[in-house]
Amino acid sequence: TLFGNILVLLAFASDRKLGKINFNLYIVNLAITDVCVSAIAMPFFALDLYRGGWPFDQVTCALWIFIDWGMTFMSIFTLVAISVDRYWAACWPNSYRKLNVTKFRTLLNFVYMCTRLCVILIWVPPWLKDRLTYSEPGTCVWSTDNNREYVLFVAIAGYHGPSFIMIFCYVKVYRVTQKSGTKFVSKITPVAGPSQPAGSSVASQPSTQHSAGTSITHTDALLSYILIAYLVTWSPFHIAFDMEYFNPKLIPFEWYCATYLLAYCNSMLNPMLYATSSHDFRTAFKRILTC
């Protein structure tokens, strides 16, 4: 998991072609999040399971819980941003193509700032309350039984709400695709540069400025795979999480751990999806691995 996501970051840093495609900035953000999950969250969880209890102090426990859940929220809010981006590109393509690299990166920085703010608003209050009230030696868990007043809030704001937005956006994109009869294409369409009117035709030759693609591209196929992988790997955990709210003893501990391990698999799947869906990433991976 860690190797695959570091490979994604190395590919982006070493290949200028990848850096010129705005959409890949979303991929970089997901890869950074997955690196944090695989380097910090997963090892501590595995050690906790192996030892049968938390072997470190409560400060380390608090940091681990914050990073583990916080990175989860970062991932899903990034996927929401990607979904809205594709919805914009599909439904208002002329407006979307006016975004040059500078405008896109400014917009992306604003999106990331909002994403971090959402993580703080959603996760910091229940995290602080839990750590100040229920921390005890040998145990490190954010328990639904101990935090019942926050469970529905965390579930709706951190998973169900964002998932609904993503599914809504992709359904709209799919309908636009079917209505227009547009097929998936791999071409990246250059946007109008500063010297070109926004309404003028744009030549198909390479340009130093690129949009994230045409309104319907292979990019949308890749994003569909990422969304499906996220829902498949994380839905069992959140189903168990919701069921625990109504009956804390309904889900056996072993099942709960199994759903959590499945959720971690999402960080491993993402680099594979990039490689199988993007020729540019495959080329960059091969160059790095064979040098």
Image (spheres, helix red, strand yellow):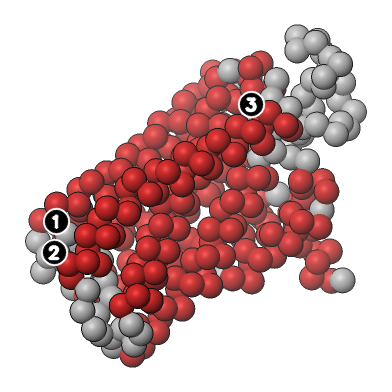
Q: Is residue 157 above or below residue 51?
A: above
Indicate left or right for 176 with 192 as reference. Answer: left
- Nearer to us of marks 3 and 2 is 2
Question: Percent from the top left, x then y, of residue 51?
Answer: 33, 90
Indicate left or right for 31 with 139 as reference. Answer: right
Specify the amino acid type for callout 1: Arg
Specify the amino acid type for callout 3: Ser
Contact? badges 3 and 1 (CB < 8 Å): no
Callout 2 environment at 10 Å: few (<14), some (14 to 19), or many (20+)?
some
Pick the quarter of the image with the N terminus.
Answer: bottom right
Question: Percent from the top left, x then y, of residue 193?
Answer: 82, 22
Contact? badges 2 and 1 (CB < 8 Å): yes
Query: Is 230 or 62 nearer to us in this picture?
Result: 62
Which residue is located at x 35 percent, y 85 percent? 56
* Residue hosting label 3: 215
* Residue hosting label 2: 145
The kind of secondary structure element at disc 2 is: loop
Callout 1 environment at 10 Å: few (<14), some (14 to 19), or many (20+)?
some
Disc 2 versus disc 1: distance between alpha carbons?
6 Å
* Residue hosting label 1: 148
